[in-house]
Image: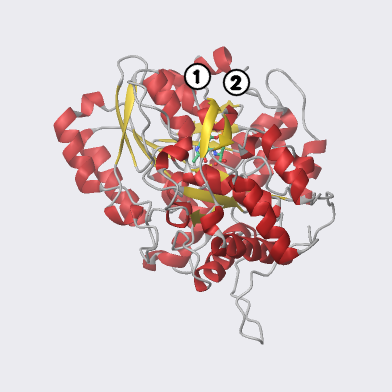
Amino acid sequence: MSTEKTAKIKFYSGEEIPLELHKVRIVQKLHLVPIERRLEALREGGFNTYGLNTTDVFLDMLTDSGVNAMSDNQLAAMMRADDAYAGSQSFLRMKQAVKDVLGKEYLLPAHQGRACENILAYTYVKPKGGIVPTNYHFTTTLAHITEYGGKIVELLYPEAFQIASSQPFKGNMNVEELEALVKEVGAGNIPFIRLEASTNLIGGQPFSIANMRQVRAIADKYEIRLVLDASLLGENAYLIIKREEEFKGASMERVIKEMTNLADIVYFSARKLSSARGGAICTNKRDEYLAMEPIIPLFEGFLTYGGMSVREIEAIAVGLYETWDESMICQSPDSIAYIVNELTKMGVPMVTPPGVLGAHVDTGAICSHVPQSQYPAASYAAALYLISGIRGMERGSLSNQRDENGNETYADMELLRLAVPRRVFTLSQLKYVIDRVKWLYDNRKLIGGLRFTYEPPVLRFFMGRLEPTSDWCEKLVKQFHKDFGDSL
Ligand code: F0G
């Protein structure tokens, strides 16, 4: 397996461009439909970017989940998959990869990341509720923990919420507040501490190993288990190599192990970490393994497939080893940094420093004229799709859930995430994104609000349907034609 490092590649021109270190051999045709059709598609999809079909989407930047490019070696491995209900060789290969890369002996397979969260919450939260301290919630994690009667407490430092910042590790857990919380509620009421690698909802921001060591020390002192959400582990490790003095120039292999060694239980969405499908929980503690083991056949499937196809399991095994390859892992974060740096130079407010998973647009600032009750980030997501065919994901108040009294809980930050899945987009496509985001910034005052026509009770951002509060979409179409003529 390649463990190639990425020496920075300099251009004679001095331009800082992310250079693709792969070649494209299988391609998929894209469609850029006219703006009138895009407006119709928005109406059909309830002005929610989850409601769009890919035939109407040009650049799909909704997520990296399940859409990272796979390698030739992953596809080759999928061909030799060993179909068996029990005792599949494919599972044993994944087990070996988890041991080699994540350093964990016991492996529990699950069909995707949220299934792991369900199992963890079922095992550790359901019996007596309690509080889960975390560096920040993820939507599905919060939903599972609250579903089983638990609560989440988010412990970040104030700079995490400063959208423009030079703090390299905005995902760091606030350890002083963590210790105070443990003293206040008692260790017995904390089923686990959860650290999310590259905190998704605050802009894909990493934590440092120094911070994780501090969290570990508190976990040890009070005997609380530490759970690592490793869905974006590779990218967090890459940014540690780039930003944390102690690990400058270290190998991905070493940094990943440093992180996983500090956790009692590691879980991940393999849709992000190493492949395009699946998930798993792993640990070195036999008692933790045994506590969760009976729940896998109940919710997922037998212990050697856990709801995944064996082909996916093979792809995960190969993908885990490929996570050691810095020249592969760098592709998405370096492209994100390119988008963020270019747009910042143009004056567009972005989350900085650039994180992982996607470039995050500060739609709270851009749409400061749209009240939070009219979902500025969702409005911006609809507007950007309308004028470009680019599908991003709302990461603001619409993605929040209502409190127990049915009141809105407004998000700390109103963001639009433009995901950059690994090795999917080309440089000219990134330039198109920058161009259209800048145009929309210059025409931001035309963006109006949205209101629900159907609001689902759980995870409302997925299936919710909305409508514009005025004719602002038509105004954007008019302005688009004025500036771009008959261009798509
Ligand atoms: N944890 C994190 C940090 C995630 O980003 C995700 C999914 C999950 C858990 C759940 O995993 O989707 O396999 O069930 N994030 C996707 C996203 C959905 O678009 O950011 P899953």
Q: Which mark is residue 59?
A: none
Q: Position of residue 12 (x, y in %)?
A: 66, 87
- Vertical placement of residue 199 versus 362, above or below: above
Which numbered disc, 2 or 1, marks the residue that appears first in the sequence? 1
Crowding at dot 1, Cα within 10 Å, few <14 / some 14-19 / many 20+, comes out as: some
CB atoms of marks 2 and 1 within 8 Å: yes
Q: Quadrant of the N terminus?
A: bottom right
Residue shown at 63% from the left, 47% from the top: 473
Q: Position of residue 90 (x, y in %)?
A: 71, 32
Picture quadrant of residue 453 = top right
Which one is nearer the viewer's eye here, 129 or 279?
A: 129
Picture quadrant of residue 338 = bottom right
Q: Which residue is mark 2?
A: 303
Crowding at dot 2, Cα within 10 Å, few <14 / some 14-19 / many 20+, comes out as: many
Q: Position of residue 272 (x, y in %)?
A: 60, 43
* Circle 1: element type: loop
Kind of residue sitting beneath label 1: Glu
